[in-house]
Image (cartoon, rainbow, N blue to C red):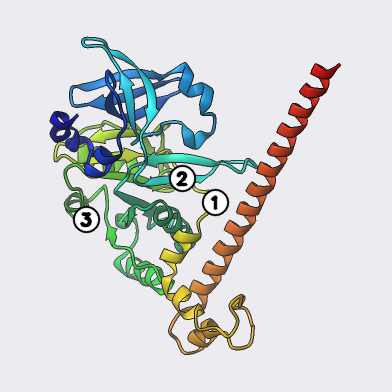
Amino acid sequence: MMNQDGELSELGWSDWFAQRSDCKQPGTVARVAAVDRDQLLLVDQEGNFRAKLSGRYLHYHHLNRELPCVGDWVCVEKQPGDDFGVIHALLGRRTSLRRKSAGSAMEHQMIAANVDYVLIVQSCHFDFNPRRLERYLVMVMEGGAEPYILLTKTDLVNPEVLATQLAEIRSVGITAPIVPLSNVTRDGLEDVKRLLLPGKTYCFVGSSGVGKSTLINQLVGHERMETKSVSGTGEGRHTTVRRELIRLDGGALVIDNPGMREFGILGADSGIANSYSDIIAIASRCRYQDCSHTGDPGCAVLAAIHAGEISRESLDSFLKLKEETIFNDMSYAEKRKKDRDFGRSIKSAKKDLRGR
């Protein structure tokens, strides 16, 4: 493995993975570039190839979070000269980007793995929403990556509107770096390029039509990602249907994502703590440990609002996110309990049948 590390580092491999890899001969490591139903597109130091999960792996791993996603490193067996491999193991994830599965299912949906930076893309025109930015930031920081905010379509608003939007983002306590840009005028494009370092992985997230694929096309230098014409409102109609890891000429690796406007949050306590560290620090001075920050006597957080140290908007968002993650976590626990109870009833029924 050691002689491969130098070449694999160009794909995001690092000592962190090397120290934790238990890939045994004749297996080798490769990175997941895309997932297409029951096949995966992998990339290693020799290039791209297709692979599938072994039957043994599928037998023991059923949950979404246990299956490889874009950005994962896997242990794959492939004979020299073959263009198809078999995946036997999933290596540990250094970071992850995940959300609650769509609908009522209380499970995590993996978006990407082993991402160094997440670029949250939001349009200045019709998509601007600081509350949604906060939710993305919680999701990013919970997974361990570093966030950037890209405000696109600056050509569709005047400078005064952009300045107001930037001030509004800061007023709710968001401190992540912000890069305004326009895919039309190319203003800000060089600022984005300077963020992209060789061997680092960047995941682009945001609602449909905010310009993610157009931006990646600008970075790649050709129409790699399919886009559609701009609608009458000035918003693009986004056609990305799968996540794909792309290596730029400069050496950075980028992942585009299908648009996602809504997402739930599961188990996000650490992400919330990182995003609202100022409120958490002040809350430690409250008279009661379980202070609700909504009117309890001796509340240091409300006192800080009255003193102008934090904004009411930031507290409202903090409380809303806490309430949502508590609700989702409780629902998830209840669902797991029901699943366990159902499993026990099945086992009991089988025992009864065998005893007859």
Between the C-alphas of marks 3 and 2, the distance is 28 Å
Q: Secondary structure at mark 3?
A: loop
- List the residue tagged with mark 2: 98
Quadrant of the image occupied by residue 251: top left
Q: Is residue 79 left or right of residue 134?
A: left
The residue at the point 36 percent across, 36 percent down is 229
Q: Would you name the residue on which mark 1 appears?
A: 266
Q: Earlier along the polypeptide chain: callout 1 or callout 3?
A: 3
Q: How many marks?
A: 3
Q: What's the amino acid at mark 3?
A: Gly
Q: Amino acid at mark 2?
A: Arg
Single out the residue that lies furthest toward the right.
356
Quickly name the residue at label 3. Answer: 188
Task: Confirm whether residue 332 shows in the render.
Answer: yes
Secondary structure beneath label 1:
loop
* Residue 285 pos. (x, y %): 50, 83
Query: Picture coordinates of residue 255 (x, y %)?
Result: 32, 39
Tell me the distance, in whole angstroms, between the alpha carbons under discs 1 and 3.
34 Å
Residue 28 occupies which quadrant of the picture?
top left
What is the three-letter code of the residue carrying label 1?
Leu
Asked if the residue under mark 3 is in contact with the one under mark 1, i.e. CB atoms within 8 Å, the reply is no
Q: Kindly check if marks 3 and 2 are in contact, taking CB atoms under 8 A apart as contact.
A: no
